[in-house]
Image (spheres, helix red, strand yellow):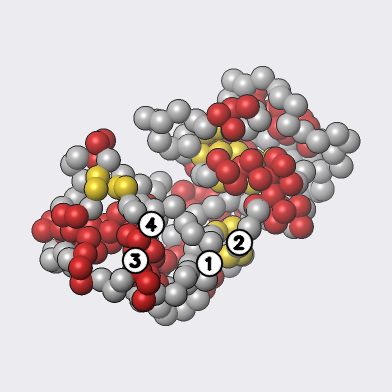
Amino acid sequence: MDAELQRQAVILFGNSLKRRPDEATATHPEELGGGATPDSAVPALDALPEPATEQVPAAFGVDLTRRQTSRLWRHVESIEGFWESLKEIEPGAVARVAAIASKLRWEVIFLTKRPESAGATAQIQSQRWLESNGFSLPSVYVVQGSRGRIAAALALDIVVDDRPENCVDVVSDSMARPILVWRDGNRTVPASATRLGIPVVRSVGECLDILSGIDPSAEKRSVLDRIKGLLGLKSGPTTPPNPPATRSRSRTPTLN
């Protein structure tokens, strides 16, 4: 999503966009096959209603003001089928999730937080996107609020997420075990994740390598220890006392 948001931000704001120092080579408007829309041509923030959904981070690699962020999301909401147009960050990852889930009998739920765009609902667009990338009959839940409470309500075993705050929510509000996908090797893993002993991987592929090697019949504490052991981490005190035994099937949610 971040790459496409950055592209749309460049289209929308053009040269007025403030780039981060490490993104000096980012795409320019003339390289996108169309001109940029001047900032002054976008309706004023006061003329727009507040977004109905919880705000999602702005495009990676660019710094947006609150006004620009609001305008960007209004622009995204006007694009027909926006959520179906995205490319996989890791090509083939969705198909691999499907193959491993089928082999190991995982029950997978895709949790995602995204505003609506023109066309089909965000849920249907996400389902179509997953199917087009190799995952048949996907269960998609467009969520708001704490990932931990959702994990608790759905009795999930493992939550894979690329946002540290969501992983912290899972530790705080559920019995599920979070895994943080932290792709940005140029930035330090947030202290909150490190302090809570949340396992960190650099890609969905690495995460699947670990999860596919875990015995689903193992007791929950052993599952977390196995994950940490494979990542070279010490076992931490993040497991709530007296966890229940794992069910016969592993319910492993992941994010697209």
Kindly state the secondary structure of the residue where label 1 is placed. Answer: loop
Other-residue count near label 2 (Cα within 10 Å), few / some / many at <14 / 14–19 / ≥20: some
Give me the C-alpha separation between circle 4 and circle 2: 20 Å
Q: Earlier in the sequence, mark 3 or mark 2?
A: 3
Confirm or deny contact between disc 4 and disc 3 (CB under 8 A).
Answer: no
Give me the C-alpha separation between circle 1 and circle 2: 8 Å
Give me the C-alpha separation between circle 3 and circle 2: 21 Å
Pointer 3 residue: 71
Q: Which mark is residue 53?
A: 1
Hey, which quadrant is residue 245 in on the image?
Answer: top right
Pointer 4 residue: 66
Q: Earlier in the sequence, mark 1 or mark 2?
A: 1
Residue toward you, 216 or 223: 223
Q: Is residue 92 above or below residue 235?
A: below
Q: Residue at the location (81% across, 48% down)? A: 248
- Foreground: disc 3 or disc 2: 3
Give the percent coordinates (x, y) of residue 1: 39, 55
Give me the C-alpha separation between circle 4 and circle 1: 15 Å
Q: Residue at the location (43% across, 37% down)? A: 183
Q: Amino acid at mark 1?
A: Thr
Q: Amino acid at mark 2?
A: Gln
Residue toward you, 197 or 16: 16
Q: Earlier in the sequence, mark 4 or mark 1?
A: 1
Give me the C-alpha separation between circle 1 and circle 3: 14 Å
Q: Earlier in the sequence, mark 4 or mark 3?
A: 4
> Would you say residue 137 is visible in this rendering?
yes
- Foreground: disc 4 or disc 2: 4
Q: Which mark is residue 144?
A: 2
Kindly state the secondary structure of the residue where label 4 is placed. Answer: helix
Q: Residue at the location (60% across, 61% down)? A: 144
Confirm or deny contact between disc 1 and disc 3 (CB under 8 A).
Answer: no
Give the percent coordinates (x, y) of residue 195: 63, 27
